[in-house]
Image: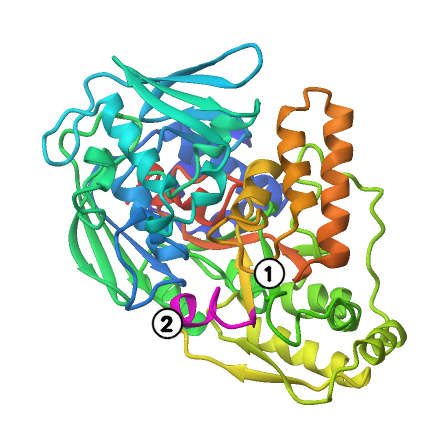
């Protein structure tokens, strides 16, 4: 039976048999669907990479305002583009370790204040220039500059000195930080010639593909880089990224074979889609979260009583049930969950309470005028429906929540981080320090709740230098409680990453770091037929 199943699974990976037929044959042999799917995945991996072809990806999270400047990347399509043409010093591996990219190794001083990244030799940029430590230095310097408005600005704040010494990039910290290499895995920090100082939008990097067609909000196409340094990646000849913000259109494109991969499968259709022939739904739990964010420096959200009223009004369990359909877990108004190694599960879960919501709303003294929550289909899967549920539960507490639906195009440039109350999402970060540094440090460019707290900033620095894990965990717990009780974050749910994948895509692995294999499926996967 095992030999027969292996033979049949090979036929599936070669496109000679449908996944549905294979599952049926396996069931006839007494094998469960889960075991049959596992065998398919193992077979696809064992067959090894197949070279050639054009991989087409349909993604939500693209706009006409997108550019190729790594500093400005804020949604799925720009991040995928960066992954295609660029490489940072390191990536976070699926198992939580480090995957060395532009750097081939890293060493730290005993106090974790001095970090030395050895730059990989013999690597060429797309323009033929050889990668040097000076390029890496200039890249970090550009993202340290407030004028760049980089999404990585927050994580660069603790760096006191940067210098190049031969093949080495040396990073000096004011306070030791054992997590520094993970901060360098931020997708904004793609190494560019002269750091992108000359032309940050040129899309010239050391990645597996070169940019061919750039139509923001529509499509982006890439060709294989013939001089790419890593032969374990970049298997297809070309990649086409189609911007498909509409969930129905995205799903239809996968079902019709127009694309091989899609992100953000709507949980409402995930089960049905997974039963379709020749494709499957992949889901993995991680650190991603769907949120509603308030600017705490803008009325009426500068009133913590009002913020607490809204936090108590939201029905988290209902949202996980009706929006995520089981593809996620309840959130607690802090961006950290059990996926983080130093998570403190003793922090009380905030419960839905109409009574407490009404009590805090009354204490806020709000004048009863409409409280505008902006949302869009592209904010996160089910965002419009989630906002409607929020409105219903808020109204039960006497809170006049009003929903304003915004167009998808321009949402991440015109609404998010601009308007004082809106729906959003975060993919999470590998370690707590990076998540807090990116979005909650007072000086972070992506502090999208406008929350500035000197005591919180001091604790973040203290946690970096604390080598005792128990003490460090305690500091992070205090920080989490502060955000939960005082911040502008309403976090009702942590989402699984749910993607749709055609069966002729090989090399798929689970990666909890972000959607579509940490946005690296286009680089790591291949076409089996």
Q: Verify whether residue 415 appears in magenta.
A: yes
The quadrant where residue 208 appears: top left
Q: Residue at x 62, y 41 (%)?
A: 31
Residue furthest to the left: 128
Neighbour tally class for label 1: few under 14, some 14-19, many 20 plus, Cα within 10 Å: many
Q: Is residue 274 magenta?
A: no
Question: Which residue is labeled 2 in the image?
Answer: 410
Which residue is at 44% across, 73% downward? Answer: 248
Q: Which residue is mark 1?
A: 290
Q: What distance separates the C-alpha of mark 1 from that of mark 2?
A: 19 Å
Q: Where does residue 73 sit, x and y in percent of width and height?
A: 36, 53
Q: Position of residue 476 (x, y in %)?
A: 71, 38
Q: Earlier in the sequence, mark 1 or mark 2?
A: 1
Q: Is residue 179 visible?
A: yes
Residue at point 82%, 59% (across, down): 350
Tag 2: Cα neighbours inside 10 Å, few (<14), some, or many (≥20)?
some
Q: Nearer the viewer, residue 168 or 261?
A: 168
Q: Where, by quadrant of the figure, is residue 86 drawn?
A: top left
Colour scheme used in the picture? rainbow
Q: Position of residue 365 (x, y in %)?
A: 79, 81
In the visual, does 253 lie left or right of 4?
left
For residue 243, side relative to residue 289 (left or right): left
Q: Position of residue 200 (x, y in %)?
A: 22, 47
Q: Is residue 236 visible?
A: no
Image depth: mark 1 or mark 2 in front = 2
Left or right relative to 233: residue 96: right
What residue span does the magenta drawing correspond to?
411-422
Please state, as top left, top right, bottom left or bottom right, where the N terminus lies in the image: top right
| Residue 110 against residue 86 in the figure, above or below | above
Count of marks overlaid on the render: 2
Quarter of the figure with the C terminus: top left
């Amino acid at each position: 039976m095992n030999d027969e199943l292996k033979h049949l699974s090979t036929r599936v990976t070669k496109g000679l048999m449908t996944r549905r037929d294979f599952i049926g044959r396996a069931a006839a042999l007494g094998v469960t669907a889960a075991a049959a799917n596992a065998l398919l995945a193992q077979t696809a991996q064992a067959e090894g990479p197949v070279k050639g072809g054009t991989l087409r990806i349909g993604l939500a999270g693209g706009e006409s305002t997108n550019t190729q400047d790594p500093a400005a990347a804020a949604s799925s399509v720009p991040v995928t583009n960066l992954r295609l043409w660029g490489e940072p010093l390191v990536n976070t591996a699926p198992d939580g370790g480090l995957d060395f990219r532009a750097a081939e190794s890293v060493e730290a001083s005993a106090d974790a204040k001095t970090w030395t990244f050895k730059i990989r030799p013999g690597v060429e940029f797309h323009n033929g220039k050889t990668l040097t430590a000076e390029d890496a230095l200039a890249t970090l310097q550009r993202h340290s500059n407030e004028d760049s408005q980089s999404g990585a600005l927050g994580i660069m704040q603790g760096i006191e000195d940067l210098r190049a010494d031969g093949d080495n990039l040396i990073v000096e910290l004011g306070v030791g930080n054992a997590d520094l290499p993970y901060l360098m895995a931020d997708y904004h920090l793609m190494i560019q010639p002269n750091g992108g100082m000359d032309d940050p939008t040129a899309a010239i990097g050391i990645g597996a593909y070169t940019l061919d067609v750039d139509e923001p909000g529509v499509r982006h196409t890439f060709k294989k880089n013939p001089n790419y340094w890593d032969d374990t990646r970049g298997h297809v000849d070309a990649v086409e990224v189609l911007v498909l913000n509409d969930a129905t259109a995205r799903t239809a494109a996968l079902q019709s074979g127009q694309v091989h991969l899609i992100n953000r499968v709507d949980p409402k259709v995930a089960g049905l889609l997974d039963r379709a022939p020749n494709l499957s739904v992949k889901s993995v739990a991680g650190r991603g979260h769907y949120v509603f964010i308030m600017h705490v420096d803008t009325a009426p959200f500068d009133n913590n009583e009002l913020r607490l009223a809204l936090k108590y009004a939201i029905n988290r369990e209902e949202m996980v049930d009706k929006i995520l359909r089981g593809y996620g877990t309840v959130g607690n108004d802090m961006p950290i969950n059990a996926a983080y190694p130093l998570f403190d599960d003793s922090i009380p879960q905030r419960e839905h309470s109409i009574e407490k919501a009404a009590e805090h709303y009354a204490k806020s003294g709000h004048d009863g005028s409409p409280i505008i929550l902006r949302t869009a289909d592209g904010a996160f899967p089910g965002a419009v429906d989630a906002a409607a549920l929020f409105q219903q539960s808020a109204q039960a507490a006497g809170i006049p929540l009003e929903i304003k639906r915004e167009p998808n195009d321009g949402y991440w440039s015109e609404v998010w981080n601009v308007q004082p109350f809106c729906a959003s999402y975060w993919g999470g970060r590998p370690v707590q320090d990076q998540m807090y540094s990116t979005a909650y440090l007072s000086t972070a460019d992506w502090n999208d709740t406008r929350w500035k707290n000197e005591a919180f900033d001091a604790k973040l620095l203290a946690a970096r230098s604390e080598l005792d894990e128990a003490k460090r965990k305690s500091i992070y717990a205090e920080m989490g409680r502060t955000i939960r009780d005082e911040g502008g974050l309403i976090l009702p749910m942590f989402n699984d990453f749910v993607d749709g994948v055609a069966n002729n895509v090989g090399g798929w692995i689970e990666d909890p770091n972000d959607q579509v294999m940490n946005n690296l499926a286009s680089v790591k996967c291949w076409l089996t037929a």
